[in-house]
């Protein structure tokens, strides 16, 4: 069986088991997403990152879900969230957002849904919200070399990531760019039972 078919079978199975990182998860407002593809001489590994705001847990995390590696992880991103949101998960206004020890100024007014405020950081501070190389290598062996990285709205750089991107887009059902904002009303994602930060078995070439 080819790598492509193994990978497609695994993401289809994880979607059916509700372990695929759905962007329309009821308790996870998506902020940004990225897909990584790695390989060595015999195996492939795929990591899907989904940065999102969980209002129930009052946290912004980068969830790494792996295919072909042993484990995933949840990385907390906003360090001072208790000072930033009110009881309705809206931004209090006038307080910088601290990410990786850096205070990032925002222009959003008080009362704006916090996920939208964090989305405004993506164009300039995307690298702070997504995983760096050391965080990725905590999951992916260094014997695996990078094949590509992809995000919605861009062109994948290899055949394997292109096919993976098309199937992931289908599984996610919708992949709007993270900078897109809803200014007229606060969006409420549909409720869906699911889990992130999971992993699947080895993908062979």
Image (spheres, helix red, strand yellow):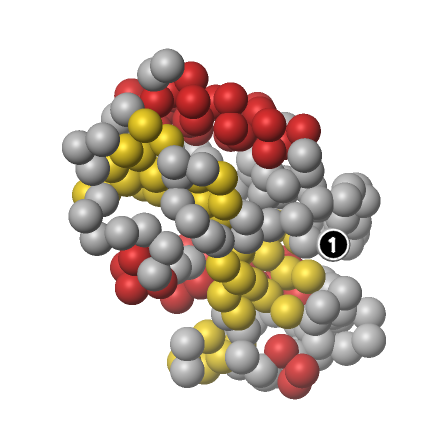
Q: Is residue 203 left or right of residue 199?
A: left
Residue at 32% across / 51% down in the picture?
140
Q: Position of residue 76 (x, y in %)?
A: 53, 69
Q: Where, quadrant-wise, is the C terminus in this rendering? A: top left
As drawn, 121 above or below 168 = below
As helix, strand or loop, the secondary structure at mark 1 comes to loop
Q: Quadrant of the N terminus?
A: top left
Measuring from the top left, give residue 135's x and y in whole percent. 35, 62
Residue name at image x 70 percent, y 45 percent: 194
**Residue 161 placement (x, y as % from top left):** 34, 29
Figure disc tally: 1
Closest to the observer, 44 or 187: 44
Which x, y percent locates residue 167?
50, 23
**Outermost residue, top side:** 1
**Residue drawn at 50 percent across, 69 percent down:** 77
Residue 179 visible in the shown view: no
Q: Which residue in the protein does label 1 denote?
A: 27
Q: In this view, does 108 lie above or below 171?
A: below
Determine whether, in the image, residue 145 is placed left or right of residue 130.
left
| Quarter of the view holding residue 191 | top right
- 36 to 95, vertically: above or below: above
């Amino acid at each position: 069986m080819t790598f492509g078919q193994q990978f497609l079978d695994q993401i289809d199975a994880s979607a059916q088991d509700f372990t695929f990182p759905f962007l329309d998860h009821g308790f996870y407002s998506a902020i940004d997403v990225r897909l990584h593809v790695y390989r060595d001489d015999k195996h492939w590994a795929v990591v899907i990152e989904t940065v999102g705001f969980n209002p129930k847990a009052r946290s912004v995390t980068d969830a790494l879900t792996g295919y072909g590696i042993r484990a995933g992880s949840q990385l907390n991103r906003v360090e001072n969230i208790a000072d930033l949101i009110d009881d309705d998960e809206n931004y209090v206004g006038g307080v910088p957002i601290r990410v990786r020890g850096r205070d990032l100024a925002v222009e959003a007014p008080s009362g704006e849904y916090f996920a939208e405020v964090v989305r405004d950081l993506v164009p300039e501070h995307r690298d702070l919200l997504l995983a760096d190389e050391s965080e990725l290598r905590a999951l992916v062996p260094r014997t695996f070399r990078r094949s590509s990285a992809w995000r919605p709205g861009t062109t994948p750089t290899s055949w394997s990531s292109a096919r993976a991107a098309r199937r992931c887009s289908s599984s996610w059902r919708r992949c709007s760019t993270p900078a897109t904002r809803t200014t007229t009303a606060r969006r409420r994602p549909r409720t869906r039972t699911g889990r992130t930060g999971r992993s699947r078995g080895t993908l062979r070439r």
